[in-house]
Each structure stands twice: as C-alpha cells, then as structure tokens.
Amino acid sequence: MIGLLLVSSFVVILNETIMSVALPRLMADLNITAGTAQWLTTGFMLTMAVVIPATGFLLQRFSMRGLFITAMSLFSAGTLLAAMAPGFGTLLGGRIIQAGGTAIMLPLLMTTVLNAVPAHRRGRMMGTISIVIAVAPAIGPTVSGIILNALDWRWMFWLVLPIALLSLVVGALKVQNLTEPKKVPFDVLSIVLSTFAFGGLIFGLSSIGEAAQGEALMPLWIPLTAGALAMAGFIFRQLFLQRTDRALMDLRTFASKPFVVAIVLVLVSMMALFGCLIVLPLYLQNVLGLSTLNTGLLLLPGGAVMAILSPIVGGLFDKFGPRPLVIPGALVLSGALWGMTTLDENSSVPVVIVLHCLLNTGLGFIFTPLFTSALGSLHKSLYSHGSAIINTLQQLAGAAGTAVFVTLMTTGTTAAVNEGIAGIPASAAGVHTAFFWGAVISLVALAASFFVRRPTNELPDGVAIH
C-alpha cells in the first residue's frame, strides 16, 4: 500500500514544476504573455497552499481510502481537462484541479507511514518519501524538456493520465484504512483565514520576481499585508480552538523542540532547492546558451544523486540518528552554493553538473533525517497536523526561495547594466548575486544543524500533549 502511495505521490508532485520549461512554448501556442503564463505555476502553488492546511482536519475526519480516491480522482480529472484544453482558461482550471488532488496526497502518504511503520524503521521509509518530496520537483523540468523536444505540450498531460488512472483503480482496491475517522468540528473561519493567509503570502512572494521586472499584477504590499494579517488571525484562532481539540491546524506541534529545529532547516533547504531550480536553468540557457532539452538533461544527474542517496540516508538515520547526517549535509549544501558563486559566462558545463550534484548530495543528507525526526517527535494524535504543517511551510519556502533568488538575480543584472556591462556578462553578474546571497542564507542551515537531536521518543508516541 505504501508503495502505491509513493508512486501516486511521485506522479502528482512531479507536476508542480513540470510547467516551468514549457512556458515559452505555451506563450507562443496560446498567444499569452509571460505574466499570464506564470499563473500556470503560481495557480498550482496557490491551490496547494489553500488546501494543504485543511488536510490535518481531512485526515482525521475521513478514511484514508476515501481521501486517496478523492485525491487521485481530482488529479486525473484535472490532467484530462488540461490535456484537452482549447485555451489558457481551461488549462489553468485543469492545473488548479490537479493541485487540489496533489495537496491531499503527500500528507496522506506521511500520515500512513507514521501509523504503519515502527519508529526504528521510519528513517528508511522517510528516505523513500524524500524522493517524492525533493526529487520529483527537481526532475520536473527534465521530464518536460524531453517531452517538448519531440511532442506537443499537451503530451505532458496525456502521458501522465494513464498512470494516474491506474493508480486510482489499484488504490481503490488496495488502500486500507489505518486510522479511525472521527467527527471533528469544521471551523469555517479557520478555512477563510488560512486561505487569505497562505494564499496571500504565496501570491505576494511569487509576484516579487514580476515586480522586479515591473510586471506585477498589483502592488506587492497588498497581498503580503493581507496575508500577514490573516496569518496572525489564523494563529490566534488555532491557539483558541486547540484548547478543545478543534483546531484546523494544531500548533501544539511546535511544543516539540526537534520539530521546530527541523522545520527551520527544512525551510532554508527548500528555499535553496527551489531557488536553484529557477536560477540554474536560466543560467544554463541565458548565459551558457544551452537548449531547453540539454538544460533539462544536465539537471538530471543531480536529481538522480538525491534519489539514490535518500533511502541510504534513511537507513543510516535508523542506526545513527540525525546529527551525524545533517551536519555534513548542511556543510556540503553550503559549500555547493558558495561554489556556485564562482559561475560566470566562461564556466564549463561539467563544473555546473558537479556543483549541482554536490548541492543535491547535501540536500539528500538533510531532508530524510529532518522529516523523520520532526514527525517522529510528535504525539500520535498530532501526526496529521504535523504533516500538514510541514507540507504547507514547504510551499511557502518554495515560493520564498523562488522569489528571493529571482529578485536577487534581476537586481544583480540591472546593477551590472547600470555599470555599463551588457548582455551575457550582465546576466552572469545577476546569477552571481543570487547564488552569493543563497550561500549566505545556507550558513543559517549550517548553524541550525548543530541543534538537531534524535527525538526522545523514538519513544512510542512522542511529545505529550498538555
């Protein structure tokens, strides 16, 4: 059953980044601007940010089998709609429906593993989950680059649809209910606040790059301020409701210090991953002059490294705990980002591949121990809330990483142009600026890695609820 959930989750998470390489083709075929095309990615992320906070409630209220069928039905329907889309509006609708299913799958997978796998074996299983969380988004551009090299953009959806439908049919037969659904109250105000909070923040962060180029849909302070105010209201509402176990997202998870430290490290690492996912392809195409297909293929070894490492690191976690893995991982991650600050218009492709592989090696040593120690430190009753919080904050970190790296790159390029540097050298200067500050941010992860601890429970049920 876990294998089925892993395959299904990999397919749906892959779609989060599969559109990035396809945007230029879509702009030409659908006669839309870059700002409009970007909504195919932004809309997906916004939907994820709105739905994921509610998954803690959904996982308690409904059966695992029912949620799996719902998630894969939504994803399959969205995929079919996108494949048949005659224009941009229908395509965007398909992407939003896809995202609704995707948002349910990953928390469902994590909660299933926590309920089904004993504590002493979770590391290896979480290592496999890390392939879904980190590798699937990383190879999305590669997959779309290969497809677009030979086929129309609609085949990005037609090729995924049979796999999604097969997963749906097999899951309907095989997925078992490992939890007992209970009637938990549904708080409408929490849903409204979380929609404006996470939706506003991610929309604002996702628009920073457009604002730096003078193409923002609205002034940035509007969505960011609305998101921040709604977030404050959401937090106060949850603190009030959790006293009677009615919270949409139970914040008692943050009573666990291993959970808090792991969350900080996950956020920084996700910022680095998504920031590099956006800047490296731009560097390879705009500075080194590589094609879309070659760019996708050159990023593949890094994704393969993380895929190979994740289950191995999971096994090592079961034996040695998180610190002996996370500290070296954070060191390699930081070293790779500092190495990327040396990239310019004269850098060789093999150097880029090596640095990208080093980056993914560091992330491979970080993600699995962090996910395992964070969720393993919680009381069993908080598993669904913990997985919802981690997955929600990942979306925020991904949006923030993309926004920060793109803004820094744009700012660096503009500064170089103002100094009289033009063309490719100016673009290279922008890339240098983005990676320099990314490397500085990575020092936060390195410092935080020394505070990582094995959960005191690999105890049976973790932190007590007070």
Image: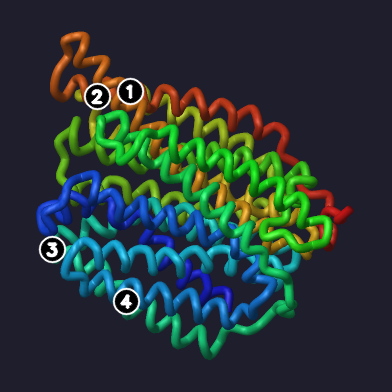
Residue 45: % across, % down: 42, 53
Structural distance between the alpha carbons of marks 4 and 1: 40 Å
Residue ID at (33%, 23%): 432
Residue 434: % across, % down: 37, 27
Nearest to N terminus: mark 2 or mark 3: 3
Kind of residue at badge 4: Leu
Structural distance between the alpha carbons of marks 3 and 4: 18 Å
Residue ID at (39%, 68%): 98
- In the image, 104: left or right of 345? right
Nearest to N terminus: mark 3 or mark 1: 3
Structural distance between the alpha carbons of marks 2 and 3: 30 Å
Residue assigned mark 2: 428
Residue assigned mark 3: 150
Kind of residue at badge 3: Ala
Q: Give the number of the mark in front: 3 or 4.
A: 4
Instruction: State whether residue 40 appears in this view.
Output: yes
Nearest to N terminus: mark 3 or mark 4: 3
Mark carried by residue 432: 1
Say if 127 sits above or below 354 in the image: below
